Amino acid sequence: MGMRRSCTSLSRLLVFLSVSDWLSAVSYAYGVWRVFRTDSLDCIAQGAVSTFANTSSFFWTVATAVYLYVFIVRSNQRAADSLVWCFHIVSWGVPLAITVAAVCLYKIGYDASEVSVGWCWVRIHAPDRILWMLLTGKIWEFLAYLTLPVLYILIKRHIHIAHAALSEYRPILATRPPSQSFSSMADMKLTLIPIIFIVLRIWSTVRFILLLVDSPARQHPVLVTLHGIGNTSQGAANCIMFVLLTRPLRTRLYAALFCCSKCRADSQDAAQRLLPGQDASTPREEDRSSPVGTDG
């Protein structure tokens, strides 16, 4: 029962992370499609949504790692579940407060793609724009770079120690089915999660550092393209890691898709059995015209 409740809590954290990533990707896509040139109203709105969603995504990504650390390493499910409310307050509240402050102080607007790929972020003419770039994303990105590897390394280390201790009792558990594939899949996920996050996000960080040193290399087409792909692909990467590479969820997804395709095929077969222009509930003309009985 406790394991099921923890899986439900973790699934909810992943849902909130997915919502943040989806909002971020949609707002970025709108900014690229719109091609802003001034501090228009929709530019400010797009910049506010992307700032809130992107910052929230950083917090939910770290919150997921903290939850796994407390639940697995500290072996304290009650403490892990009690942190969920704190995660909501921090992961929604802090980005919202920062975004509202930035909009009210006129810091969000057209940035001439200095550290973006067509979307609006911190206004290019803001005198303290570096400070607001840090507050509206970069400082949380840096903290995620440091926090995620540490937490997932500690989780992996704890699992390896527990696995080694369990291997001493394998002669006793010889009749039980092996779980080597499950352990290897979990180990691969714990390795890839921080690596994928850093690989996707590092390009925006590189461009920010190049801005600090006033290097024109930040506008290199390859670097700009990698930045655009990385910032909009975090949600897809999380979907692959947490859904497609998770056997129970993958099985349920395949079953749902198979059920939908089967129902669609059955409805098409039923439609093909009907005559053209004829409804199943409507009797055919010859049935209506045929006599019920004949006189002798």
Image (spheres, grey):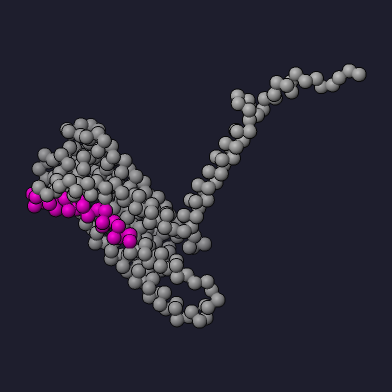
Which image quarter holds the C terminus? top right
Tally the marks: 0
Q: Is residue 200 magenta?
A: yes
Could you tell me what secondary structure mostly forms the magenta stretch? helix
Left or right of residue 14, residue 173 in this image: right
Residue 84, relative to residue 154: is it above or below?
above
Q: Which one is nearer the viewer's eye here, 229 or 9?
A: 229
What's the residue at 41%, 64% (across, down)? 185
Q: Which one is nearer the viewer's eye here, 74 or 164?
A: 164
Percent coordinates x, y for residue 94 in the rendering: 27, 49
Residue 190, relative to residue 267: is it above or below?
below
What's the residue at 63%, 25% (across, down)? 278
Using the rendered image of the protein, determine whether residue 79 is visible from the camera's viewpoint.
no
* Corner quadrant of residue 190: bottom left
What's the residue at 29%, 60% (across, down)? 195
* Corner quadrant of residue 188: bottom left
Percent coordinates x, y for residue 127 in the rendering: 9, 43
What's the residue at 17%, 33% (across, down)? 37
Percent coordinates x, y for residue 281 in the rendering: 67, 27
Q: Which one is nearer the viewer's eye here, 109 or 166?
A: 166
Q: Which residues are magenta?
A: 192-215
Percent coordinates x, y for residue 35 in the rendering: 22, 34
Residue 254, relative to residue 124: is it above or below?
below
Q: Spot the residue most to the right.
A: 296
